Amino acid sequence: MKSLIQKLVETPGPSGFEYQIRDVIREVIGDTADEIRVDALGSLIARKGTKTDGGMRVMISAHMDEIGLMVTHVDSNGFVRFTSVGGINPLTCYGGRVLFMNGSRGVIGVDGLERGKMPKLSDLFIDVGATNKETCPVSVGDVCGFERPFLDLGKRMVAKSMDDRIAAAIAIEALRRLESTPHEVHFVFSTQEEVGLRGAITAAYGVDPDVGFAVDVTRSGDTPRFSTKMATALGDGPAIKVRDSSFIADPRLVDWMVKTAERAGIPYQMEVLEAGGTDGRAIQLTRGGVPAGCISIACRYIHSPSEMVDSDDVENAVKLLVKLLSVPITLA
Amino acid sequence: MTNNQDASTKRKPEIGPSQINLLEKLCNATAVSGDEYEVRKIILEEMKPIADEIKVDALGNILVTKFGGGEGRVRVMLAAHMDEIGFMVVKKHDDNLFEFARVGGIDERQLPGKAVLVGRDHLPGVIGAKPIHMTTAKDRKKKIDVSDMRIDMGPEIGDKVKTGDRATFATRFRVLGPSICAKALDDRLGVVTLMELLKYAPDNIDLLAAFTVQEEVGLRGARVAAYAFNPDMAIALDSTPAYDLPHWDEEDENVQYNTHLDAGPAIYVMDRATIADRRLVNWLRDTAEDLGIPYQFRQPGGGGTDAGVIHKTRSGIPSTSVSVPSRYLHTAAGIARLDDWVNTLSLLHAALCRVTPELLAGERRD
């Protein structure tokens, strides 16, 4: 599974520019799905199974976009100014390397910053090695993502876009391992999550599910100073979300997920996230309302170029997802 | 110019005295978000003779359809918002001094001393300011909160004002050489452009025109208009700031100008609400390049247009926006260039004439 993860995290795909990662995912899925389609906003939707008695139409959403940068201006000396695509922390930018969708590369510099001060995005620029505007290989509107190779630390894995390619990997693996299901399952690899769940909004409208789940990363409360007030920790299992700041998971689904995990002997942890949101919100608010839940993977250093997750959490998330999709869903 | 029953793709829209007069009428009308009555009336009068279908929906949007002919017509939605930023009277005080709230994004620092027109009868008033004689140096450094400002109507006239009445800046439309100076260029420029496009709607598409309400308070009208039209693709026609002034610090290049005047229509790649569909961006760019029409890409960043809600409608609608650049938007007086408006209209008309199903045949990609 690690080679799949590496392939996914090393493909660029900032929000709105998911065509490369979409092609990779489509190729990886191959004929394991019964049907694959792409909607108007670019989400890849892979269906498996058909609705049987007691089955439901289920949407699983893992977003394939990642945070990135977009060129706003190239100055006369060839330096590139940019704005953020999604939630970029200027702290994690300086010295970073970026890869543009057109193949150009560059490094992020800062100039004129007072010692000890936090940079603002407007203090930063991308240096693509151009000597003037005319020779600059990128122009206004071009998009880049961070460039950082996958790092395998054994039990732990690090990459620039674990958020949310790790969920894409989990969804793909679950799709492969899912032998039989009473449900019509739509695995959605959604777009533009990082700028406001936009792909999931239109995908959920199109799928019109009876029930839906997001798979995403969540914050982890186990770093040295424990300053992130989260009960979640790497290695404690996939997290079953109770709520975040934009979404309250359907409590019936939360109970059912917990019971299913316990019956199957799959480790899990509970998640309450006080800031942040996932495609779960978009699914829940679709049409007349959809019961929705979320499986999260605890992740350190989210939205930095080095996001860390635990391999066992990933494996157990796949097991949990396959289990959930193999049995009838009870909304008691 | 309303008699265009024989309009065909061969005829091109132009901007002459009648279009400028129409823009003047639209800019001088009052249509603060939520009460777009005056602008709606003007549009209905002009569009009824040429529309194949025309209706006003539950929120007050005008939805006009102009059908093309032949097979494989793409359903193209164009949206321009009728509403403008302004004020609402919230409380009457003694001496006909009215407490007011802002409607839409207005910087309170530029309000004191501005003349306004209140209510549907356009009653004159002024947002009062302490004269310089009476202020100290310390006073003059302080920002005045809008809650401390009043619209002064004086006796008699003020008696006719009710809580809830809207007000706008009193600025009257003027042509200044190659420029236009007016309030509400955002988005009457879009409105008048869309009216002209309807008059010259090309045959290869079904043109679904939405004159929307309540854009300035959160893109509310366009949301339901897009749901109703359910188009194949959409473009919001709007106006966007040009902050292309010489930078004060000469060592520093102005790197945050949004757009430039005289550089042509501004095509959107990304704003806060929308990441444009590149197929549409490229189609607009290629049209401009092929025909030698000047254009610019609006600097990606903040702001939002009706496209922000349109593209998320139903199963998703490929969308982007095109704006006429203008200086000093959301203040009492904006300045735009006639040439930018002409080029915006030319680009949009030419691009619409080139729409075929192939434009949207593939997947969303660069």
Image (spheres, rainbow, N blue to C red):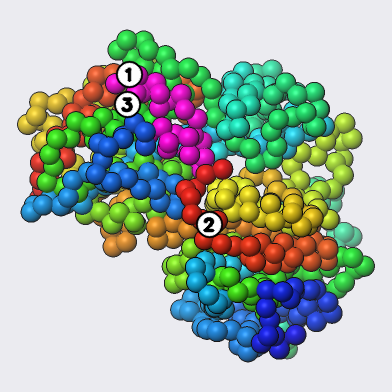
In this rendering, position of residue A307 left or right of residue B266: left
Mark 3: amino acid = Ala
Q: Position of residue A140 (x, y in %)?
A: 69, 40
Residue shown at the point (74%, 73%) measured from the top left = B12
Residue to which mark 2 is pinned: B358
Residue B154, above or below A143: below
Q: Is most of the magenta stretch helix, strand or loop?
A: helix
In this rendering, position of residue B164 left or right of residue A291: right
Q: Chain of mark 3?
A: A
Residue to which mark 3 is pinned: A298
- Residue A214 seen in the current view: yes
Q: Quadrant of residue A5?
A: top left
Q: Are marks 1 and 2 in contact (CB under 8 Å)?
A: no
In this rendering, position of residue A268 left or right of residue A31: left
Q: Foreground mark, 3 or 2?
A: 2
Residue shown at the point (46%, 43%) measured from the top left = A192
For the record, the magenta segment spans: A1-25
B347 or B85: nearer the viewer: B347
Q: CA distance from mark 1 to mark 2?
A: 39 Å
Q: Position of residue B231 (x, y in %)?
A: 48, 66
Verify whether residue A42 appears in magenta. no
Q: Secondary structure at mark 1?
A: helix
The residue lying furthest to the front in this view is B71
Determine which of the numbered discs, if any, sits on residue A2 in the image: 1
Q: CA distance from mark 3 to mark 2?
A: 44 Å
Q: Secondary structure at mark 3?
A: strand
B185 or B16: nearer the viewer: B16
Residue B321, above or below A250: below
Mark 1: amino acid = Lys
Q: Are marks 3 and 2 in contact (CB under 8 Å)?
A: no
